[in-house]
Image (tube, grey):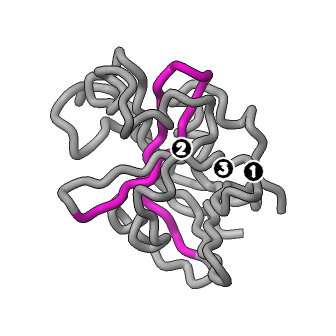
Amino acid sequence: MKMLPQDFFCRSVTTLAEELLGKVLIYEQGDQRKQAIITETEAYGGIDDAASHAHKGKTPRNWPMYEQGGYSYVYLIYGMHHCFNISAGDKGEGGAVLIRAVTTLPDEHVLTGPGRVGKFFGFTRAQSGYKITEQKSYIWVEDWGYTLENVQQTTRVGITKATDKMWRYLGTIARR
């Protein structure tokens, strides 16, 4: 399989959030490789999205959101959960897609919630800022031909601002 190219990520946050469904997120660390099918995402825009970390501008924490699409953005919530995002769009836009749920491979264990996803992969803030379109980053996304069925578009969860945006995408893996 081949990693997705840079231009795949240089699209609107909502398009990227939907198109990431069914793709395989891979992380190699040392001799360990973890991989999972993405089954739920949420889009977060730039300064116009009050729920986005980019809403108040670029900071030392959220700078990957302002890079060209295809950078990892990992942040810590509640002092214990690392959440993994992928930047979207053009440089300076401030958008990212949160990976909310995955199905692990090869055992097909369903993990719901971005904290569980981060824990499975072992992500920390140290993985923030990786250019995931380069093999040397150790984090990348591939298309293995999985499709999702029963795809839904709903409002985002776990936020208190901009709760009306239908920017959450989820589905179940279609059996081959």
| x, y percent for residue 41 | 45, 47
Compared to residue 116, the image places residue 89 above or below, namely above
The amino acid pointed to by label 1 is: Glu
Q: Name the one closer to the observer, 111 or 62.
A: 62
| x, y percent for residue 159 | 21, 39
- Residue in view at x 62 percent, y 55 percent: 22
| Residue 96 lies in the magenta-colored region | yes
Residue under numbered circle 2: 86
Would residue 78 be found to the left or right of residue 68 on screen? left
Please provide the residue range marked out in magenta: 80-104
Discs 2/1, front: 1
Residue under numbered circle 3: 132
| x, y percent for residue 125 | 41, 56
| Residue 118 lies in the magenta-colored region | no
Give the residue furthest to the right.
1
Q: Which quadrant of the view contains residue 100? A: bottom left
Residue 166, which numbered label?
none
Q: CA distance from mark 3 to mark 1?
A: 5 Å
Q: Which quadrant of the view contains residue 113? A: bottom left
**Secondary structure beneath label 3:** loop
- The overriding secondary structure of the stretch rendered in magenta is strand
- Residue in view at x 36 percent, y 68 percent: 116
Q: Name the one closer to the observer, 153 or 97.
A: 97
The amino acid pointed to by label 3 is: Ile
Label 3 with label 1: CB-CB less than 8 Å:
yes
Label 2 with label 3: CB-CB less than 8 Å:
yes
Q: Which quadrant of the view contains residue 88? A: top right
Q: Visible in this render: residue 65?
A: yes
| x, y percent for residue 74 | 42, 51
Residue under numbered circle 1: 134
Quarter of the image for the N terminus: give it.
bottom right
